[in-house]
Image (cartoon, rainbow, N blue to C red):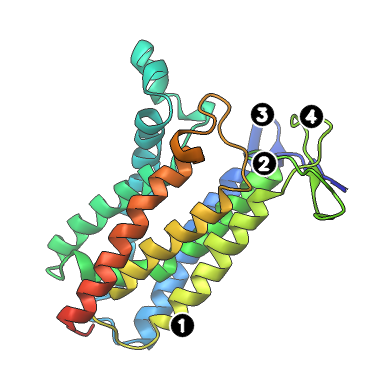
């Protein structure tokens, strides 16, 4: 088995000021979105994908990720706790973000931008979808560096020689599920969407493929990720992450099928 390297979560410290790796991963995620967006807009026939639109997508998308991610965590994971102490919901420095909540926040931002630029929500969503997975990969790498959100225990380390012992996870080998999610939801999903969207596709197809692809990959990864200790395994032996991913898969498949029946190219 392997031992988690226990990297110092603080990347740079100058006096009382400290820059954490997790914060740097967020900056990398937003930077990748910005540069990949400009690259795609300059080399592909995305109607209306101007520099101003990309700037707005980044600005409002960041707000959607932070506000939606926090609100999603409050509502999906610990509603009772935050109901008893509402002010704690504002303490984002204590941790607690939900991808599914962040996605809803980004969807609201894209609806606003689509209306502002008179392009429609689906056109903006199709442009933005291939730019998101690299940011997800950066976030999962931040989780790995912090040694958090580790995987479930491994019964036989001979079958999983890359299993790791994480600080705080006990003297038990676990799946490095952060790296699984890095590879599936980040790198693999990025490659699929980037290649698929390189040619004009029916309106809504790229966004639908993103929803379905992320939902499937997250559902798979959850089998190796340790469930939240305050929730555990829920109905039908599935975790909260899996339950939240199922609607994404269904909606994504429905959007994909609808887009090809509508066959309005980008």
Residue 80 left/right relative to 140: left
Q: Which secondary structure, mark 1?
A: helix
The mark closer to the camera, 1 or 2, is 2
Q: Nearer the viewer, mark 3 or mark 2?
A: 2
Q: Is residue 10 visible?
A: yes
Q: Earlier in the sequence, mark 1 or mark 2?
A: 2
Alpha-carbon distance for marks 2 and 4?
11 Å
- Residue 88, horizontal then vertical, whole percent: 42, 18
Q: Is residue 256 left or right of residue 79?
A: left
Q: Residue at x 51, y 39 (%)?
A: 237
Residue holding disc 3: 16
Q: Are marks 3 and 2 in contact (CB under 8 Å)?
A: no
Which quadrant of the view contains residue 124?
Answer: bottom left
Q: Nearer the viewer, residue 50 or 67?
A: 67
Per the image, label 2 sits on a secondary structure element best described as loop
In space, the residues marked 4 and 3 are separated at their CA atoms by 32 Å
Q: Which residue has dot 2 on it?
A: 150
Q: Position of residue 229 (x, y in %)?
A: 58, 27
Q: Which residue position is annotated with label 1? A: 195
Please tell me whether residue 189 is drawn above or below residue 234 in the rendered image: below
> In which quarter of the view is residue 235 placed?
top left
| Distance from Cα at disc 3 to Cα at disc 2 | 30 Å
The residue labelled by disc 4 is 170
Q: Residues within 10 Å of mark 2 (few under 14, many from 20)?
A: many
């Amino acid at each position: 088995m392997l031992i988690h390297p226990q990297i110092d979560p603080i990347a740079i410290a100058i006096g009382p000021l400290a820059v954490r790796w997790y914060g740097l991963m967020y900056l990398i995620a937003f930077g990748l979105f910005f540069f990949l967006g400009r690259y795609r807009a300059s080399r592909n026939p995305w109607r209306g994908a101007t520099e101003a639109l990309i700037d707005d997508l980044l600005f409002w998308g960041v707000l959607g990720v932070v506000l939606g991610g926090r609100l999603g965590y409050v509502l999906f994971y610990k509603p009772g706790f935050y109901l008893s102490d509402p002010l704690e919901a504002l303490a984002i420095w204590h941790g607690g973000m939900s991808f599914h909540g962040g996605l809803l926040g980004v969807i609201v931002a894209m609806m606003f931008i689509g209306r502002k630029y008179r392009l429609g929500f689906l056109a903006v969503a199709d442009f933005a979808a291939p730019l998101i997975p690299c940011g997800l990969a950066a976030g999962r790498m931040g989780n790995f560096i912090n040694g958090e959100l580790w995987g479930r225990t491994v019964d036989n380390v001979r079958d999983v020689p890359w299993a790791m012992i994480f600080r705080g996870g006990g003297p038990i080998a676990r799946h490095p599920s952060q790296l699984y999610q890095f590879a599936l939801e980040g790198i693999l999903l990025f490659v699929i969407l980037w290649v698929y969207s390189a040619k004009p596709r029916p309106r809504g197809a790229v966004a639908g493929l993103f929803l379905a692809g992320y939902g499937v990959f997250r559902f798979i990864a959850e089998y190796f990720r340790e469930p939240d200790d305050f929730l555990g395994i829920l109905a039908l032996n599935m975790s909260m992450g899996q339950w939240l991913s199922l609607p994404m898969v269904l909606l994504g498949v429905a959007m994909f099928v609808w887009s090809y029946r509508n066959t309005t190219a980008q």
